[in-house]
Structures are given as C-alpha cells and as structure tokens.
Image (tube, helix red, strand yellow):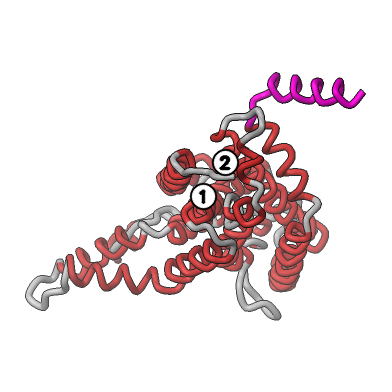
Amino acid sequence: MTATTAQDGATWVRSRPGWTVVARKEFADHLLSARFLAMISILGLVAVGTVYGAAQSLGDVAQDASGAGIGLFLRLFTVNADPVPFSFITFLGFLAPILGIAYGFDTISGEVSQGTLPRLVAQPIHRDDVINGKFVAGLGAIGVIMTTVTLLVAGLGILMLGIVPTPNDFIRLVVWLIATMAYVSIWLALATLMSVVFRGSATPAVVCIGFWLLVTLFGGLLAQLGADVLSPVSPGDPASPLHNAQTELTLSRLSPAVLYDDASTALLIPEVRTLGIITYQQIDRAVSSSLTAGQSVLLVWPQIVGMMALTVVLFAAAYITFMRREVRA
C-alpha cells in the first residue's frame, strides 16, 4: 500500500507542471501561517481606522449629494481625517512593501538555513520550478490580503455612507488593485533576489528594509540633488527652474514609490488630469472636469508598465542567480 501510494504521488507530480505543485504547497502554508494572520490583521485594523475617519468627514457631504454620490466613494481611499492623520492610499504606499519583503526574504535562504534545499531540488521537479512556485505562492498570498483589505474598505464605506460604487468606480478600484499588486511584486522580487544572494535568514530582510527606507524616506532628496547637478538653476536663465523641475520629476520616477503614488492618485481621484508639470497658463486655460476610468487608465499606463518591468528585471536576476548556484547536500 505504501509503495502504491508513493508511485501514485510521483505520477501525479510528473503529470503537472512542477511549479504548480510547489506553489500549491507554499500557498497553503502561507494561508495557515501566523505571518498571514498578522499581516491581514494589521492592514485590516489600520484600514478600518482610515475609513472611519474618512467616512466621518464625508458624512455630511454624502447627505447633501442628492443620492448621486459622484466621487464620494473613491474619496474613502484618499481623504484623511481625525483620528488617523493619513489616508488609506498614503498608508498603503508606505507599508505595502513590507508585504513583499515578508513573503520573499526567506524564499530560498530559509530552505538553506533549515538544510532542506538539497532535498527539495532532489525531488522529481526542475530546479527553476522551486523559485517560480515560491514566487507565485507569495504573490497569491499577497493578492488575498490586498483583495480582502480593499473589500473591507469598500464594504465599510457602503455601510457608513450609504453610497454604492458606480461601474466607473469599480473599474478604477480593480485597476488600482492591479497597480498595487505590481508595486508589491517589486519588493517581493527584490526580497527573493536577496534571499538567493545571501545565505543567512535575517540578512535578506535587513537589506530589503534598508532599500525600502532609502527609497521611501530619501528618494525625493536624492532626486532633488541629482536635478541640481544635471540641470542647475541659473539666475540668468528664466527657463532653468522649469528644466530643473522636469529633471527632478524624471529622476524621482526611478523610484517605485513615486510610480505607485502617481498611479494611485490618478486612478482614485478622477479630477487629476495630468501627472506632469503644468504652468500657471495651462491651469488658467484648463476646463474643470473629471476623467473617465478609461482615460485615467491611459494616463497611468506607463507607471503600471514600469512597475511590472522592474519586477521582471529583479525576478530574472533572482532566477539566473539561483539557477547558477551550487546546491550541496
């Protein structure tokens, strides 16, 4: 009976792509782990706090909206009010990378520390199936957390404001959720790369957190310093301040945090019509109106593609490094 069961199991593994077997096992482990419960609890509690404050500030406006609720539902994600001094997207833009780091820092280094990597790659699956399956499982667990938190925010908003999202609002939320997943996947890919490069369990997490703090806290300062070097402001050139600002904007968009902030702002605030630098003449001549969901998606499409491309580059580096790595028993 034992031999028959083992043979049936081996046949089942060979009949399916190896990465799906690894992903299924890792995904189940993620859903039952204390890490998953901690992450979803922390994000859920802060989401409730931000929605409560936003709903309180929007309550009077919702009563005077004649049932239309145009634009009010999306403001739940962008308005900050007491007792929480920041909006939901501000909070998420700052802490969402922790999700990617938490599910990627021990992808390979954890197996090395436990001494299970040689036995894992000795199974009837290819070596690349290991890293592919683990990355997909981590991305799936993050997707469950983000979808749950987004639905929690939307549900509380409907209960507290009595406003049902329109199809336009729904499209914006779906695209914003895709952009959020693209943003978090950058940090998941970075953490996976660090997990392959470093053999310790704690070192990848420390390095990734260092990158996160550098990009989040000092990204704007570095972009400003680079703009002052590349396009300095000249007192005799009236166009130099504009060139300096354009250079700073270009350099700042090398940061995934800025790309995600641009995408979130344009998708959740329909009144945003441009993400570049505009002059006072352009503001004076602009017609005050809101963009449709399709127009906002076109506006942020470069940012979303840029985040996806960065994810592919980082994961490709992790993949190549892992494939060339020597695994000893």
What span is in magenta? 1-18
Q: Position of residue 188 (x, y in %)?
A: 55, 52
Q: In the displayed structure, does residue 230 sit left or right of residue 93?
A: left
Depth check: 178 or 121 in front? 121
Residue 189's mark? 1
Image depth: mark 2 or mark 1 in front: 2
Residue at the far right: name it. Answer: 1
Q: In the displayed structure, does residue 78 sit left or right of residue 306?
A: right
Of helix, strand and loop, which one carries label 2? helix
Is residue 207 highlighted in magenta? no
Depth check: 202 or 149 in front? 202
Depth check: 115 or 218 in front? 115
Image height of 162 relative to 117, above or below: below
> Which residue is at 63% across, 65% downward?
88
Q: In the displayed structure, does residue 9 sit left or right of residue 75?
A: right
Residue type pointed to by label 1 = Ala
Earlier along the polypeptide chain: callout 2 or callout 1? 2
> Which residue is at 77% across, 44% downward?
28
Residue at the far bottom: name it. Answer: 83
Q: Quadrant of the C terminus?
A: top right
> Which residue is at 57% across, 41% downward?
131
Query: Label 1 neighbourhood size at 10 Å, few (<14), some (14-19), many (20+)?
Result: many
- Name which quarter of the figure residue 65 lies in: bottom right
Q: Quadrant of the N terminus?
A: top right
Q: Position of residue 249 (x, y in %)?
A: 32, 62
Q: Which residue is mark 2?
A: 131
Residue 269's mark? none
Q: Position of residue 202 (x, y in %)?
A: 58, 66
Residue type pointed to by label 2 = Ile
Is residue 8 highlighted in magenta? yes
